[in-house]
Amino acid sequence: MSPARPWNFLTADQAGGSDNRVFEDGAWGGGWHPDLAPQENDVVVREHWGQNGFAHTDLDLQLKKHGITHVVTVGMLANTCIESTSRHAMELGSHDLNGTSYAHAILSSDEIVTAFKGAHV
């Protein structure tokens, strides 16, 4: 293990991301999109590594602490981070299953805003 790569057994993608500082604070992809930046009183979960937003973070604790029962996942790659985090949310009981899949629905941002406008979930 080296300080640049603090984990053993990285995949080629993880090693490349580490070497190229992908998503590192201050590097490419490491900042908030202006439309998604935390607002006053927002809870910000500790940063994760790998493909699962729950792994090695306080996400589950924060959801339970704040009584949040529904999770909306967004990300860059549907078959990695979004899927891993969504499946983990389902296993923790953060959302109900609809059929045998791990998601209730795949919605656009506009559809989500319309569906949840004025709702407290």
Image: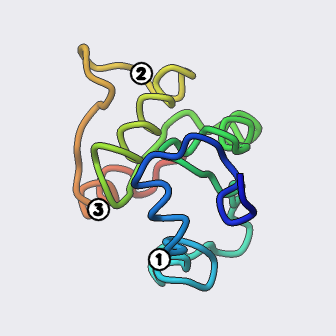
- The answer to whether 9 is drawn above or below residue 21 in the figure is above
Badge 1 vs badge 3, beta-carbon distance below 8 Å:
no
Residue type at tag 1: Gly
What residue is shown at x 24% (from left), y 15% (from top)? 99
- The answer to whether 80 is drawn above or below residue 16 in the figure is above
Return the residue nearer the eye: 27 or 108. 27
Residue 88 rendering spot, x and y as whole percentages: 50, 29
Q: Is residue 16 left or right of residue 92?
A: left
Return the residue nearer the eye: 101 or 96. 101
| Label 2 vs 1, first from the N-terminus | 1
Return the residue nearer the eye: 109 or 29. 29
Residue type at tag 3: Ser
Question: How much space separates mark 2 and mark 1, taking CA atoms?
Answer: 32 Å
On the image, numbered disc 2 is attached to which residue? 96
What residue is shown at x 39% (from left), y 51% (from top)? 116
Residue 22 rendering spot, x and y as whole percentages: 49, 72
What residue is shown at x 29% (from left), y 31% (from top)? 104
| Label 1 vs 3, first from the N-terminus | 1
On the image, numbered disc 3 is attached to which residue? 109
Q: In this view, does 101 lie to the left or right of 82?
A: left
Q: What element carries label 1?
A: loop
Question: How much space separates mark 1 and mark 3, taking CA atoms?
Answer: 20 Å
On the image, numbered disc 1 is attached to which residue? 29
Badge 2 vs badge 3, beta-carbon distance below 8 Å:
no
Question: How much space separates mark 2 and mark 3, taking CA atoms?
Answer: 20 Å
Residue type at tag 2: Asp
